[in-house]
Amino acid sequence: MTVDNNARYWAYAHYLIAFSRLLSQEYQSESILGTTIAKSSGFQKLSLPATPINHDTLSQALRHAWFTELLITEKIKYPDLLPFAIPWSMVQTYYAIHAGLRSYFIATGRTDISTHESALQTISSDICNYKNRFPSPWNCVLSGDVNIKPLYVSNIPDPITLQSPLYSPYRNNLWQHYGLFLKTTRNRQIERRIKTWKKQNHVGRISKNQRQQIAQNLQATTIFNALYRIRSRANYQDIDSFTFCNASNIDFMELQGAMIQIVYHTLFVFEIMIARIIRKKVFEVTIDEFVSTNLGRAASNTIIKRWSYIKASF
């Protein structure tokens, strides 16, 4: 049991560390990320939605994202706390990004997206339908049956051949880890759909054709589905993988740092699009309101830093 729990911990850790390292590999600076997004045709087509934006609701959603990000960021100052805090950091990583996602939906005129499921479905549709809006690797999605070989993830040129997340993200191709993260997430989504289908149809087995039908009907899997999966496992199912793992304080520091970077870069993507839609001057008002508070003054390495790059990008 201890061995299995240890393996689960390192699987989660490697997925998140690989994602963070991939972002650093692809974008050596925030300037590169900002310029990449600002030059895309999808970004340049962003405009105010037909439905008027509720700026109070948008500002609240952004502050939710920034507040949760600060909680994740501040914790790394307390290494002795991290062994106990890491499961909740995984949860907070998802929730900080989910708040950023909600902000993006509000800015683009979608105010009726109230559940995690609907949010994940909608962002999947946006990534697939607005192909030049989201930069790599956020624009990489996996569709269809994961058992097909060779298995390709959209916008990743090479097939996904990595078999285990336990391989080191420091010595292996980071795109392979990213693709495997999507593959294993989608496989769990398909298995849940199959379990539901069996229960509804009162059968114990499923045909190959029916399985393929379920896989084809399932919406494309994105990195947001993968982060939601990590959140669910850490929050509800796998506390023993943290209790019995053999990670050291240095390992926990590395994982916490990876989650900080994932949140930082993902919020950057949403924020630059929101600023394009509502105009930079309007966006800056919300930032100024937040950083003028006692808690907001701690944001020098989060939204304040990001904003300096975002406003210079377009």
Image (cartoon, rainbow, N blue to C red):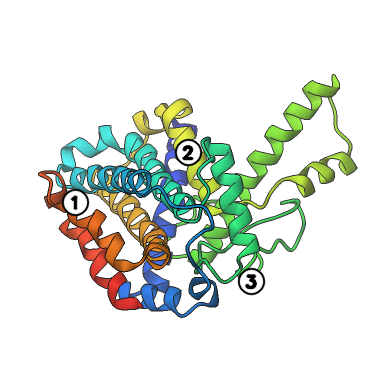
The answer to which of marks 3 and 1 sits earlier in the sequence is 3
Graded by Cα atoms within 10 Å as few (under 14), some (14 to 19) or many (20 or more), the crowding at tag 1 reads: few
In the picture, residue 264 is in which quadrant?
bottom left
Image-based side of 89 in relation to 106, left or right: left
Q: Nearer the viewer, residue 215 or 43?
A: 43
Local SS, label 1: helix
Q: Quadrant of the C terminus?
A: bottom left
The tag earlier along the polypeptide, 2 or 1, is 2
Q: Which mark is residue 8?
A: 2
Of helix, strand and loop, which one carries label 2?
Answer: helix
Please give the name of the residue rendered at 29% of the width and 72% of the height, measured from the top-left corner.
311
Q: Is residue 29 visible?
A: no
Work out how far the residue at label 2 is from the one at label 1, CA to CA, in angstroms.
Answer: 41 Å
Q: CA distance from mark 3 to mark 1?
A: 45 Å
Residue 96 percent across, percent down from the top left: 36, 45
* Residue sitting nearer the eye, 203 or 168: 203
Residue designated by label 1: 289
Q: Are marks 3 and 2 in contact (CB under 8 Å)?
A: no
